[in-house]
Amino acid sequence: TAGPTYEAIDPVRGITNISSGKMGYALAAACAAAGAEVVLVSGPTRLTCPAGVTRVDVASARQMQTAVEEALPGADVFIGVAAVADYRPAEVAADKIKKTGNDELVLRLVPNPDILAGVAARADRPLCVGFAAESRNLAEYATKKLHGKKLDMVVGNLVQDGMGGDHNTVVIFDHAGQHPLPRAAKERVAQGIVNHVVRLLNQSSNA
Ligand code: C5P
């Protein structure tokens, strides 16, 4: 998955996250270059689909979850890079909501499903990789995600190091420990992440 999700409030407004989609698209391209058959489930971005990748466009978290479930049978690896909105409006207004003078407008939000944790909880789960974009305490929060969502690997980055830009500094967290990658263009970082995924896949097939 890549990019943000968009949760409609009414036909012209919605709730979203800031995410360029660049890291997820770079990873999809790196996986395809490594010989994988790649389905990229993407929220709204300005990016073009990498060569050799099948893109499925979605808007909301629930649409993203459905598209992921459809793409999952037979998959060896699931990499969740999308910045999924944690909440969505409880109701979507059919018509544009009109201003009511100076009164407050209250939006009721309900939690979205955790797509990655849902995939990792399946009996027939593929190797599961998550991302942790944090503003502080990276190692603590990334390790919590690794165990809490029952993942094989978490790619952690500090938001101030990577968001929106073309470069990123990441640390890979897995059950063997921490593996920092050098700061580099997102394409190069994506290759490093794919190399680590391949090492874990080889370990699990040798186990
Ligand atoms: O819990 P948090 O949102 O920080 O976890 C980030 C990781 O979980 C990312 O890999 C993201 O793609 C995934 N995620 C998800 N569905 C959600 C929330 C996060 O797949 N609803």
Image: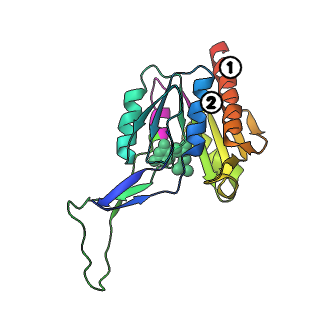
Residues 148 and 180: in front is 180
Above or below, 167 relative to 202: below
State yes or no: Cβ of the residue under disc 1 lies below 8 Å from any atom of ligand 1: no
Residues 9 and 121: in front is 9
Task: Quickly name the residue at label 2.
Answer: 30
Above or below, 29 relative to 199: below
Left of 118 or right of it: where is 160?
right
Asked whether residue 151 is in view, the answer is: no
- Identify the secondary structure beneath mark 2: helix
Q: CA distance from mark 1 to mark 2?
A: 20 Å
Above or below, 34 relative to 173: above
| Residue at 60%, 43% in the rendered image | 23
Task: Quickly name the residue at label 1.
Answer: 203
Left of 35 or right of it: where is 170?
right
Where residue 105 sits: x, y (%)?
Answer: 31, 76
Residue 41 quadrant: top left
What range is drawn magenta here? 116-128
| Residue at 53%, 52% in the rendered image | 19
